[in-house]
Structure formats: C-alpha cells, structure tokens
Image (cartoon, rainbow, N blue to C red):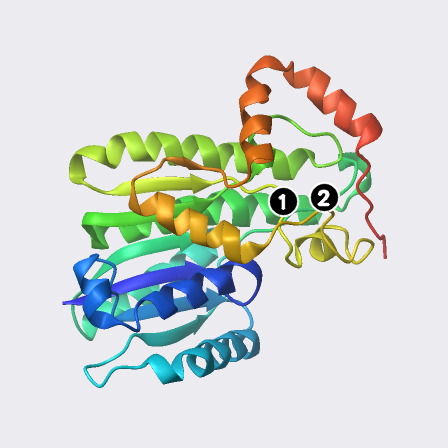
Amino acid sequence: MRKITIITGASSGMGAEFARQIYGSNQNKKNAAIRNEYTDEIWLIARSKDKLEKVKQEIESENNHQEEKSGKTTIKLAPMDLSGRDGVNHFKSLLESEKASGEFTINLIINNAGFGTYGEFAETPLEKELEMVDLNCTSLTGLCGEALPYLKRGSSIINVASLAAFLPLGNFAVYAATKAYVLSFSVALAAELKGKGINVSALCPGSVSTDFANVASNGARKEVLHGKDPVKVVAHCLKKAKRGKRIILWSTKWKLTAFMSNFVGRYLCARYTFKYNKRPYKHQ
C-alpha cells in the first residue's frame, strides 16, 4: 500500500523546505525504511501550479545524484485553492480520486498553508481578515478531518501554528487569534488520537526568513525582521515530530517567550504590542 506525505502551502517558504528535506531523507530508501520514514509519494499542494513545478524541479535536481536503482519517492503536484469549505471539498475530492486508483495511507500531513495581515484591525481590509480565518482555521480543521480515515498507527499530523498563538497581539489581532486556535486544536487532537497511535504536533515558529512579511504587509515590509533560517526550523520540527513532541519551538528565545506568556496579562500584551509593535500595511 502506498505511503503518502502531504504538504500544503508547498510553493514557497517553509512548505517548500519541508518538501525538500523529506524528499532528500527518502533518497536512501534502505535507511529511511529502517527509521520508518520512507514515503512513496509526496503531494505538494498550493494555488500556483507554476510555483509548485519550480519547487519540484529544484528538489529533484538537487537529489538526482542520490537516487537509487531500487526506486525513489515521487513528487506529485496538486494545485488548488484550499481556502474555506470549498477548499476542504477540493481536498476531499483529491483523496477520493486517488483512492479509486489504489489504496494508500497518509503517513504524514503537514498543514502549512496560511497567511497573516499586518496592521490595526479597523484599518485592514475586512475581506482579507475573513479569508485568513477561512484558510488558517476552517481549512486546517477540515483537512485534518478528511485525512483522518487515511491515517494509521504511526502516522503524524504537523499543524503550523505560530509563536503569536500564545498571547493576543495588537496590530496582528486576527492572525494571532487564528494561530491560538491552531495550537489549541492541535493539542486537543493529540490527546484524542494518542490511543490510536497517531501523533499530532503544533509547530510554533517566531520570525522565519520567508515571504510572510511581504504578504502580510501587502508589500510595505519586504522581509521578516530578525528572521531565522527556515532550514534549521524545519529540520528541528521534523526531528521533534518523530519523537511525538506536541508543541515545537526551535530557538531559545521562542521557548522563553512562550514560557513567559504564562505570566503576562493578555490585555496588557495586546495593548503593549498595539502601541509599540507597529506593523506596516500598504493600502491600495
């Protein structure tokens, strides 16, 4: 039976890095099988087919010299908009069509698709904020639900939350709230699935060097401030997820911030970040 890894938001940033590292680790099929990490297919999901094609070509090119005659992991592209209930239905149809062509199990699903919006809630486009809730919360929840029947003992779910999940943040209100939902949902789901031998992890990164800031600011801030290396963040996440870690934080600073959130008033944090942590947003 085919073993599948699914990565959403895979056209850039951490999603593409997850694909790169998982594919690379699977090229030595014998060693990967011993570690119970081998996957027959990696499905990359994002809206842009062209960007997915580029990621696939780059990954395969980087690993061509490592391929074994005994076979290799296949990268499949599934360009689709996952936003909201319609997106969940698209994902459901993908699973059903694949099942019709042959049985498979999902050994890992990484729900990385999501985005944020900088700025004061009253001054940012409401439609954009609602789209964020649809993708960050509704889609992630639905994808977990649709994937569950295909998960078996030893399978894993990684939901990408954020360091912003630990406290309300001014100028980042909806994003922080959606990631608080992801964190809470993931921990509860981990408790429910423990008896079935299915691991659930919430990755809670702080600033990572991706295109996140450019999207969140609508072009007003091109790069994430003090962004960490996504290669290190992803490698740490995969290592900890294999060990069943429920909440994953990479840097010491992130761990300290998460710990200190237990001692800071929620309103105080929201008010402080609103006044002193301004996040630019370019209005059209």
Q: Residue at x 70, y 56 (%)?
A: 215
Q: Quadrant of the C terminus?
A: bottom right
Crowding at dot 2, Cα within 10 Å, few <14 / some 14-19 / many 20+, comes out as few
Looking at the picture, tell me which residue is in the foreground, 112 or 173.
Answer: 112
In this view, the residue in front, 116 or 244, is: 244
- Tell me: 95 left or right of 64: left
What residue would you read off at disc 1? 130
Q: Residue furthest left?
A: 1
User: What residue is at 37 percent from the left and 35 percent from the top?
Assistant: 246
Q: Nearer the viewer, residue 70 or 152?
A: 70
- Amino acid carrying label 1: it is Leu
> In the visual, does 28 lie left or right of 181?
left
Q: Residue at x 46, y 83 (%)?
A: 61
127 versus 275 height, above or below: below
SS at mark 1?
helix
**Residue 9 visible from this viewpoint:** no
Q: Is residue 200 visible?
A: yes
Residue 80 pos. (x, y %): 48, 67
Q: Which residue is mark 2?
A: 126
Residue 264's x, y, as percent?
Answer: 63, 15
Residue 176 locus on image (x, y percent): 61, 35
Would residue 225 be found to the left or right of residue 123 on screen?
Answer: left
Q: Which mark is residue 62?
A: none
Amino acid carrying mark 2 in the image:
Leu
Residue 83: image location, x then y, percent: 52, 55
Category of crowding for the residue at label 1, using alpha-carbon neighbours closer than 10 angstroms: few (below 14), some (14–19), many (at least 20) = few
Q: In the rendered image, which quarter contains the N terminus?
A: bottom left
Quarter occupied by residue 200 = top left
